[in-house]
Image: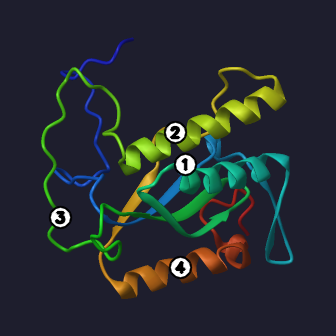
Amino acid sequence: MNYNSDIHHRRSIRLKGYDYSQSGAYFVTVCTHNRECLLGEITDGEMVLNEFGKIVADEWIKTGEIRDEIELDAWVIMPNHFHGIVMIRRGDRPVAPTPVAPTPVAPTPAALPGPRPKSIGSLMSGFKSAVTKRINEIRKTPGAKLWQRNYYEHIIRNEKSLENIRNYIIHNPAQWEEDENNPIKY
């Protein structure tokens, strides 16, 4: 069945009217398809990347290298998900935290599908696509889903929030047994 906006009502998890290409700090999370543990394992509270996890790390680092407007902050790869802090810089405007009153985005013309260029959506789309392509080549599974549809994002609005999220990322592997994404949570 094709998507019909009169029948199907997808709820967006994005802040309505917010320009996700503006300068600021963003916390992003993306989970593997069906939250399958594909990227490595936690051993003694430390994440040990497997071949696929190393590809995720490599592509995330490339993300910061190939995009002039992007600055990577703390990030971690977990067995079935990834967390990262991304800073978008526009000229000499400060990077973080993001202003409390966000700049509204101009409507995107219907003729231009997909995420706005140089936005969090564009960054995440490119990242997920590059990782998926490389891993599917190794697994010989062209076209197979690697990631869940979409991704979670949070606009970081102040220094305290930025510091709390950094700490969460740094300590995430040690908290794996209690993580809601852990399929064998005790």
Q: Sequence order check: which comes first, mark 4 or mark 2? A: 2
Mark-to-mark CA distance, 1 and 2 = 11 Å
Identify the residue under disc 4: 166
Residue at x-position 30% and y-position 74%: 94
Q: Report whether 21 appears left or right of 86.
A: left
Amino acid type indicated by mark 4: Arg
Say what secondary structure mark 1 lies in: helix
Assess disc 3: are there few (<14), some (14-19) or many (≥20) residues with their C-alpha within 10 Å of its C-alpha.
Answer: some
Q: Indicate the position of residue 68 as horizontal and vertical percent values.
A: 45, 54
Assess disc 2: are there few (<14), some (14-19) or many (≥20) residues with their C-alpha within 10 Å of its C-alpha.
Answer: some
Mark-to-mark CA distance, 4 and 2 = 23 Å
Asked whether 11 or 132 is in front, the reply is 132
Is residue 148 in view?
A: no
Mark-to-mark CA distance, 4 and 3 = 22 Å
Say what secondary structure mark 3 lies in: loop
Q: Residue 66 carries which label?
A: 1
Identify the residue under disc 2: 126
Is residue 92 in view?
A: yes
Amino acid type indicated by mark 3: Pro
Q: Sequence order check: which comes first, mark 2 or mark 3? A: 3
What is the residue that sits farthest to the bottom in this orientation?
Answer: 160
Identify the residue under disc 3: 102
